[in-house]
């Protein structure tokens, strides 16, 4: 099985010695994340996010199907992650790796199990027709903090997506095209994101948004999932050295504080995209609060 090229002994020692002096190779502070870029496709529900060199593309799609027999009032939300050699030579095409499973399960917990996306809102006719919402994540470049970049891309795509408007009369379902009725946004109750942290020197040094090299030489990693209301959704420490509980709580607080800034960046990108799509100012004329 292919493996990621690991830092040499000299590179490892240089990174660790620099961290003892609170210096990172890219010049960032220990609690700073890399440059964030968010762009959207021509259609709704396509988000391309770059966090430093790490890049993840997410596409949202929806079809109408029958619900599960034991969940007649719930729609279906499916999340898949497709790792390919395009993102890293360590990824194999057509073979599900542990990293792919971890990404999918963590993001599913972040959104669906935290009730950020209530599946009841995807129900059209109870027991007969529901929306099957599908999110496909395709990492294009893996250069550290892949989970953070993937969570931003997923949230941005879900907030950007517009689902076709529907109407039920007399038990008959009508799905309107975009010419008849404007599609509607998804009913997201809150906006959770993941923050990746790496620790060194027995937990004394903690890095936010570690690069691939920093992840490879770290003593352990932790993921904090939270929303901008500072509600913690998940905490995942995947092995590594033992860390004191007080220090661990400090890491969680650090991750929660950074989520608000990342969420604001997503909101700003959505506002810019909305202005570009509404060049004629039609949306402003349709708002109830406009001057008449």
Image (cartoon, helix red, strand yellow):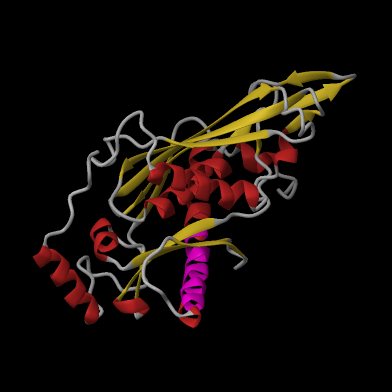
| Residue 95 location, quadrant | top left
138 part of magenta stretch: no
Is 287 left or right of 215, judged from the image as shown? right
Total number of numbered discs in the rendering: 0
**At 23% from the left edge and 71% from the top edge, which residue is drawn?**
24
* Magenta region, main secondary structure: helix
Q: Residue at x 75, y 32 (%)?
A: 123
Q: Nearer the viewer, residue 217 or 20?
A: 217
List the single residue furthest toward the left: 10
Left/right of residue 241 with respect to residue 156 in the rendered view: left
**Residue 55 sits in quarter:** top left
Give the extent of the magenta segment. Answer: 248-263
Residue 34: x %, y % from top left: 33, 61
Whole-percent x and y of residue 26?
22, 65
Q: Position of residue 155 (x, y in %)?
A: 53, 47
Residue 253 falls within the magenta-colored stretch: yes
- Residue 245 x %, y %: 50, 79
**Along the viewing direction, whichever of 172 and 224 lies nearer the viewer:** 224
Q: Quadrant of the N terminus?
A: top left
Residue at screen point 32% across, 30% down: 93
Question: In the image shown, does 162 or 275 lie closer to the viewer?
Answer: 162
Residue at image point 48% right, 40% down = 276
């Amino acid at each position: 099985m292919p493996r990621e090229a690991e830092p040499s002994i000299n590179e490892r020692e240089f990174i660790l010695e620099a961290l003892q002096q609170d210096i990172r190779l890219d010049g960032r502070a220990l609690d700073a994340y890399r440059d964030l870029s968010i762009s959207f496709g021509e259609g709704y529900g396509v988000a391309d996010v770059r966090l430093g060199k790490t890049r993840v593309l997410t596409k949202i799609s929806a079809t109408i199907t029958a619900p599960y027999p034991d969940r007649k009032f719930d729609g279906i939300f499916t999340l898949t992650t497709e790792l390919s050699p395009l993102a890293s030579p360590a990824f194999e095409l057509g073979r599900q790796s542990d990293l792919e499973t971890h990404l999918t399960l963590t993001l599913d917990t972040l959104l669906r199990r935290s009730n950020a996306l209530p599946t009841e809102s995807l129900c059209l006719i109870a027991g007969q027709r529901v929306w099957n919402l599908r999110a496909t994540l395709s990492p294009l470049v893996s250069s550290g903090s892949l989970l953070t970049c993937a969570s931003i891309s997923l949230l941005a795509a879900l907030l950007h997506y517009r689902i076709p408007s529907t109407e039920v009369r007399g038990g008959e379902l009508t799905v309107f095209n975009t010419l008849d009725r404007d599609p509607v946004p998804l009913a997201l109750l809150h906006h959770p994101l993941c923050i990746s942290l790496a620790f060194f020197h027995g937990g004394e040094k903690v890095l936010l948004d570690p690069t691939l090299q920093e992840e490879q030489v770290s003593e352990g990693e932790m993921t904090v999932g939270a929303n901008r209301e500072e509600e913690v959704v998940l905490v995942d420490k995947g092995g590594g050295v033992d860390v004191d509980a007080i220090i661990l709580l400090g890491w969680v607080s650090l991750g929660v504080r950074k989520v608000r800034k990342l969420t604001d960046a997503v909101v700003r990108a959505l506002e810019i995209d909305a202005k570009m799509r509404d060049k004629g100012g039609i949306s402003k004329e349709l708002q109830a609060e406009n001057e008449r």
